Image (cartoon, rainbow, N blue to C red):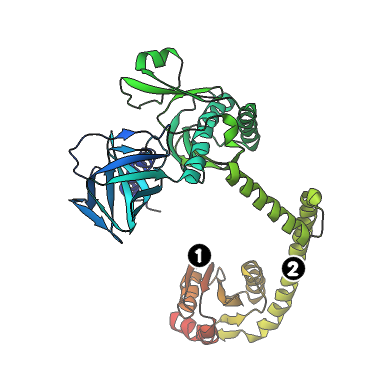
Amino acid sequence: MAVDEEGFKVAMDKQKAQARAAGKFKMDRALDYTGAGNTFVGYEQLEAPAKIVALYVDGTPTAELKAGQTGVVVLDTTPFYAESGGQVGDEGLIRSGSATFAVGDTLKIKADVFGHHGSVASGTLAVGDHVTAAVNTAVRAATMRNHSVTHLMHKALREVLGDHVQQKGSLVNAERTRFDFAHNAPVTDVQIREIEARVNAEILVNSPTQARVMDIESAQKTGAMMLFGEKYGETVRVLDIGSSRELCGGTHVQRTGDIGLFKVVGEGGVAAGVRRIEAVTGSNALSYLQDLEFAVQQAAGTLKTPPAELQSRLTQVLEQVKSLEKEVTSLKGKLASSQGDELMAQAVDIQGVKVLAALLEGADAKTLRDTMDKLKDKLKTAAIVLAAVEGGKVQLAAGVTADTIGKLKAGELVNFVASQVGGKGGGKPDMAMAGGTDPSGLAKALASVPTWVTGQL
């Protein structure tokens, strides 16, 4: 088989670039803003008075936004957190009199300038208007729970898996936390349970969180975790959550207990040496566990067994299924064998070669092959095509005895038949398999085999 190595390399490089981009915050550089930076008050306030200093429609500055229009609002003061450090931007409302602007996302235009993306639900907004900016408190609270637990999870991962664990990317929103980290093996179920236990133990302590702003050198002396490859300014924010201490500019819960509950919902590889773990918290964790419980109860009800005994009952059912499958296979073999004996009488002699093309009722691919071998042994010098139909699909097997492959090839024979039933196949000169999607043409295709063999001989 040939492999397009250059094409693979290009595709892999593209995927790596996308993965790196997904792990970093977005910045809306398309907007040409030259004004002063805004004041972010979102650590302390979720609602604040502000003034509109710029408006944009399709990336172009405008004096006003009217009802129904989509655009970007820039304020002099904002409680909205702009996407950064893996945490998504805030949602909410900007209001001015009868005008309401629904914010669906908040992105950085510059490091200290936030753009509020959304649409005008009613009224008109104009540059210079005094407004009230209000963050969606429920979405912010859920996002904070997931962001705070990411710090605890990062620490637990290092404790359980080793100090080689380093953050490679993250995405924190109101639904879940997604965390990519350096590790060269799947995280086992036992390790996941240990990580969950450590994180939930920190949550139960319900210790207060603390954020301190200090210079980078002082932060380093505190032992705060710093992300490898990340660029930090002269002043940084050191965040203590439980026993975790990291540099972080995101929004967080006031106490670890505010997280509520932590549950890992997924783990897998995303690149060489990089794993991804996903988890939920609070009400999302409760919903996840309730859905699992409902699924277990439904399965237990179907199998008529208590939920606590579901595993043993499933084992019994699977053993029964295996036993029945063996029995079905045996019966199919016996049925095909009896059909094979009857089919021998249908073989026609063409220049010394016994030619047989027939349909085997209820056969599968294995039965076709087994029956083919028996027929070849009995017919001695032969070219055979056997077919079966199941679920609207055609299965074909072609066989040519060893003394005949100099004149006929099983692969060519099976493709000749398959081409008439919407399929193709291949195999060795003495045995080949094929499939098709048009059972309606099978009878005619099988009937054409003697003519094809005559032409080949």
Q: Which quadrant of the figure has residue 430?
A: bottom right
- Residue indicated by mark 2: 328
Query: What residue is shown at x 28% (from left), y 33% (from top)?
Result: 112
Judging by the rendered image, the residue that carries numbered circle 1 is 427
Residue 408 appears anywhere in the view: no
The picture quadrant where one finds residue 298 is: bottom right
Q: Vertical placement of 435 versus 234: above or below?
A: below
Pointer 2 with pointer 1, Cβ within 8 A: no
Mark 2 or mark 1, earlier in chain: 2
Q: Residues within 10 Å of mark 2 (few under 14, many from 20)?
A: few
Question: Is residue 333 placed above or below 5 in the rendered structure?
Answer: below
- At 40% from the left edge and 24% from the top edge, which residue is drawn? 237
- The front one of 257 and 309 is 257
Q: Amino acid at mark 2?
A: Val
Give amino acid for label 1.
Answer: Gly
Residue sitting nearer the eye, 397 or 61: 61
Name the quadrant containing residue 286: top right
Of circles 2 and 1, the one toward us is: 2
Image position of 435 (left or right of 226): right
Question: In this rendering, would 98 be left or right of 60?
Answer: right
On the image, the x and y values in percent for residue 261 come to: 62, 38
